[in-house]
Image (cartoon, coloured by chain):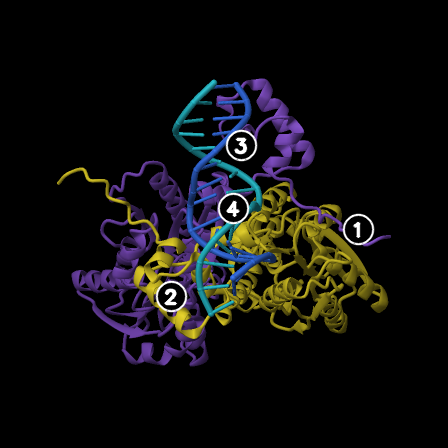
Chain colours: A purple, B yellow, C cyan, D blue
Amino acid sequence: MGDEKTPRHDAPTIGRVATMAGVSRATVSRAFTRPDMLSPETVDRVRKVAAKLGYTPNQVARALSTGRHGNFALIVPDVANPFFPPLIRAAQKRADLSDFCLFLGNSDEDPALEDKLLGRFLGQVEGVVLASSRLDDAQIRRHAERKPLVLINRDVAGIPRVLIDTAGGVRAAVDHLARLGHRSIVYVSGPAASWSNRQRRQALRQACATAGLEAAAVAAQRPTFEGGWRSARAVIATGATAAVAFDEVVAQGLLAGLAEIDVDVPGRFSVVGCDDVISATTTPPMTTVSNRSAEAGEAAMTLLLDVLRTRAVSDVRYVLDTHLVVRGSTAAPCGR
Amino acid sequence: MGDEKTPRHDAPTIGRVATMAGVSRATVSRAFTRPDMLSPETVDRVRKVAAKLGYTPNQVARALSTGRHGNFALIVPDVANPFFPPLIRAAQKRADLSDFCLFLGNSDEDPALEDKLLGRFLGQVEGVVLASSRLDDAQIRRHAERKPLVLINRDVAGIPRVLIDTAGGVRAAVDHLARLGHRSIVYVSGPAASWSNRQRRQALRQACATAGLEAAAVAAQRPTFEGGWRSARAVIATGATAAVAFDEVVAQGLLAGLAEIDVDVPGRFSVVGCDDVISATTTPPMTTVSNRSAEAGEAAMTLLLDVLRTRAVSDVRYVLDTHLVVRGSTAAPCGR
DNA sequence: CTGTTAGCGCTTTCAG
DNA sequence: CTGAAAGCGCTAACAG
């Protein structure tokens, strides 16, 4: 066993295939990217040799030369928030279908981190999807002019976006509660930077006004179980008999917080969540606004692919609407 | 408005910075990668110019030249399975902390797809984490010799791996059930290719043998809510009075299936889940084996970074152990 | 400390 | 239809 320099099982390059097949490197390249430019026999022979050698085109080298990286990036505020996994999954699948790889970023609800991640990705992707972005419009616009960019649940004019319109669902929730006899409803809000949050809050206020109900609001700082939990006392203090929560994680926390201070749901208080994602399994099963996050993920990816194909920057605004799913967390208010 | 060729706001290259700063390209490069090799003033001047021009090193070009891509890949069987999001999140965060980008792949429980994704990633990453891989040992070994590879919940000798050892938790579950008076326990199994599944099944069998209980098993083909649901009848048919399910998604399905055929839990039948991830919110709250998926994700990433640093391929086997969390889905069997 | 010189692996005119 | 040659943007010896 001499210390002969083991040539380190290097990945075969286009050059090796070329000499082995007795053609030029250009021909090998074309055998993979533009087979139509070659005689069928040549293509066949080259491919065969390549296969035998276990050759795989080097994506990175290719990207350097063409600018086409074959990658996308998706950034979400919180991977572990149950709203996002179906979205992520669908986006990944759609990307994969078109032979793209997907980078995933978790911004932790932090605009600065989101910006940093975006910067890291930008150099090696052909496009980006920002889900529930916490960046401000200016930052988004700035990035959008460097790379194709699609938004989910963020409404910036001129930038392709897919929006899950929960306003319809929230209005239906208010109607539902009004019909049950509630006179005052409180909105437990989520992150201020969230478009969905603003949309829901506003829809609630308007629907209440229309129906002649009182509308209050309390803030669950972060959209977490704990945030919902902590807001329970404040929610009750508003005097409302029903709450609509920003999302189901908050709603679930609220449920737990109410249980802790012995407020029976739905006997004494009604709760409605948003994004039907865990609501079937809560106790009680939660009345909620339906969810289409997987569809949103897929649509955004498809949009991005379209933008790449047709450089036309048409102002797309893809809206998915929602409805109310009535379960067991809502009932008539007591003592009225 | 003449059609003067707008030079397409191209990203500034190292060359532009070099001429603007009156130095060579090598110097610019070094100002970013090896500032210690340059005089402080030069570094300063170059960086200033670069900043003014908005120069960002091109990752791809750098990777082509150095082989260091600054990327990792993580592949999971199902992003939407609640076991994985915390793991993904933690892994992403850990990678980000070391300035790495993370590709995410979803294998859909399909070995062929997993292999394909891996192939796609391999060319542009420095290492890979396979969580609950469905590949066979040979395939894993093959990939591991091309790139640093870390496994989660898969025990292949010689390959760095982090294992969540649920055997302890399952044994505790059996003890718990035995103490309650159960004489026969059924395991509702998950994917055959899953190491965790084999481990849990085996732990259950052994613990039952030790405690003198009967052990049965029924298969929930896919580890889904529906799979658990469908297995309800078969579970009851075994004559057992308690079940331990592969994971909580299956357990939750089982709960729903049992409810549908009017089997009261825990009155008539007890259920234990695995991976404490949604169990606090089921009805009834589920007795379960604790979960450490986030820790596993972070540990795997850290391991990968270590492997990269010290090319020492020591045979690491990082084990996280578990315990039983008793909640409301277990009780003494009726009529005994 | 800094510049010169070769590439990394692949694509892409431009000629034949 | 195929080959030769010139890069993509950056890094890495090797000289000074």
Q: Amino acid at mark 2?
A: Val
Asked if both marks, 1 and 3, belong to the same chain, the answer given is yes
Task: Assign a secondary structure to mark 1.
Answer: loop
Task: Assign a secondary structure to mark 4.
Answer: helix
Q: Residue A23: horizontal and vertical position, in percent?
A: 60, 26
CB atoms at circles 2 and 1 under 8 Å apart? no
Left or right side of B249 for A266: left
Q: Label 1 marks which chain's residue? A: A
Q: Sequence-wise, which precedes: disc 1 or disc 4?
A: 1
- Mark 3–mark 4 Cα distance, whole angstroms, equals 14 Å
Give residue A4's mark.
1
Q: Residues within 10 Å of mark 4 (few under 14, many from 20)?
A: many
Q: Residue B32: horizontal and vertical position, in percent?
A: 45, 65
The residue positioned 43% from the left and 67% from the top of the image is A108
Q: Residue A96: horizontal and vertical position, in percent?
A: 50, 42
The residue to which callout 3 is attached is A29
Q: Label 3 marks which chain's residue? A: A
Q: Label 2 marks which chain's residue? A: B
Q: Amino acid at mark 1?
A: Glu
The foreground one among A55 and B235 is A55
- Mark 1–mark 3 Cα distance, whole angstroms, equals 33 Å
Q: Nearer the viewer, mark 1 or mark 3?
A: 1
Task: Assign a secondary structure to mark 2.
Answer: helix
The residue to which callout 4 is attached is A60
